[in-house]
Image (spheres, rainbow, N blue to C red):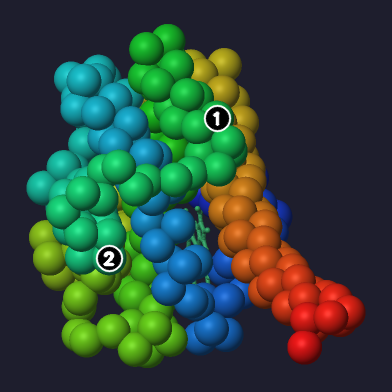
Amino acid sequence: SLDLSEQIKEVTKESHVRAENTELMLSFQRGQVTLPQYKLLLCSLYEIYQVLEEEMDRNSNHPAVAPIYFPAELARIKSIEKDLEYFYGPDWREKIVVPAATQRYSHRLRQIGKENPEFLVAHAYTRYLGDLSGGQVLGRIAQKSMGLKSGEGLSFFAFPGVSSPNLFKQLYRSRMNSVELTAEERNGVLEEAVRAFEFNIQVFDGLQKMLSVAGNRQRQSSTDSNAVHGKTLQIPGTF
Ligand code: HEM
């Protein structure tokens, strides 16, 4: 039988391909990520990591969480807060906007933190190993795309506590594999990992939709004012 780290990679392979092919992730890969896209992504990541890391902290002594609990190396919440403050200013907390999908994702994280802490490994794997894999490259791409100065607003991508992402990923996998799970629990974890990818895909699609609605509204209002302007000129007697 395969190790958990191999199984989890296998069962999420197809989901990973779908995640890579969301409009948002394609924008990153094409070097075309925009400031509005990135800012909205940070808002959702804030909500997600806040709950994920709170639940990891609260369950840090749970036998299925303790081996994969690496707050010093992995915790993202402070970095995300720093980036949000950089982009939105000191009152960033009042400016957070997230699609409904982000709320569903964070509710699920809260629920499993309370009811099935052994499933947290699926969520931690999906986010942290993803961040450690594509993250470094995506950070550089994001910087270039948005013309940011080195590191500014990009703390999310930096893992100062991890000197070799590849070695750390190896350690993380071996820790995952040391978690003792019944067959039923293991199946639950694998299912939850697929679900975790699905949540991420829905968040990306959700925030992309928010951007397209906002963009349409802007375009609409500029056509509206043109129309009003045109009409005004046609009113007889105005001249
Ligand atoms: C691993 C690319 C998006 C989760 C990887 C790896 C690459 C990669 C090159 C390393 C594969 C390996 O070491 O064998 C990308 C690209 C993305 C993207 C280009 C989009 C621009 C995502 C997203 C998630 C994710 C959105 C989940 C939210 C993961 C995970 C791993 C991983 C969990 C570790 C797989 C394992 O070794 O078990 N990704 N990825 N990735 N990615 Fe992504």
* Residue 134 horizontal side relative to residue 197, left or right: left
x and y percentages locating residue 94 in the rendered image: 30, 42
Q: Quadrant of the C terminus?
A: bottom right
In which image quadrant can residue 48 be found? top left
Residue 112 to residue 145: above or below: above
Amino acid at circle 2: Phe
Q: Badges 1 and 2: C-beta atoms under 8 Å apart?
A: no
Q: Quadrant of residue 225?
A: bottom right
Q: Nearer the viewer, mark 1 or mark 2?
A: 2
Residue 41 in percent (x, y) is at 44, 57
Furthest residue toward top:
115
Q: Which kind of residue does numbered mark 1 sit on?
A: Arg
Dot 2: within a 10 Å radius of its alpha carbon, few (fewer than 14), some, or many (20 or more) residues?
some
Say left or right for 209 vs 79. right
Q: Nearer the viewer, residue 45 or 207?
A: 207
Depicted 77 relative to depicted 148: above or below:
above
Q: Residue at x 58, y 66 (%)?
A: 24
Q: Quadrant of residue 60?
A: top left
Return the residue at label 1.
104
Secondary structure of the residue carrying tag 1 is helix
Q: Is residue 4 above or below residue 221?
A: above
Nearest to the observer: residue 205 or residue 166? 205
Tell me: is circle 1 under 8 Å from ligand 1.
Answer: no
- From the top left corner, tell me how far across and down residue 82 is, in percent: 17, 58
Query: Mark 2 = which residue?
Result: 87
Q: Residue at x 19, y 27 (%)?
A: 57
Location of the N terminus (image quadrant):
top right
Q: Left or right? Give the position of 107 relative to 68.
A: right
Q: Is residue 49 visible?
A: no
Q: Residue, x 27% and y 65% (percent of image)?
A: 87
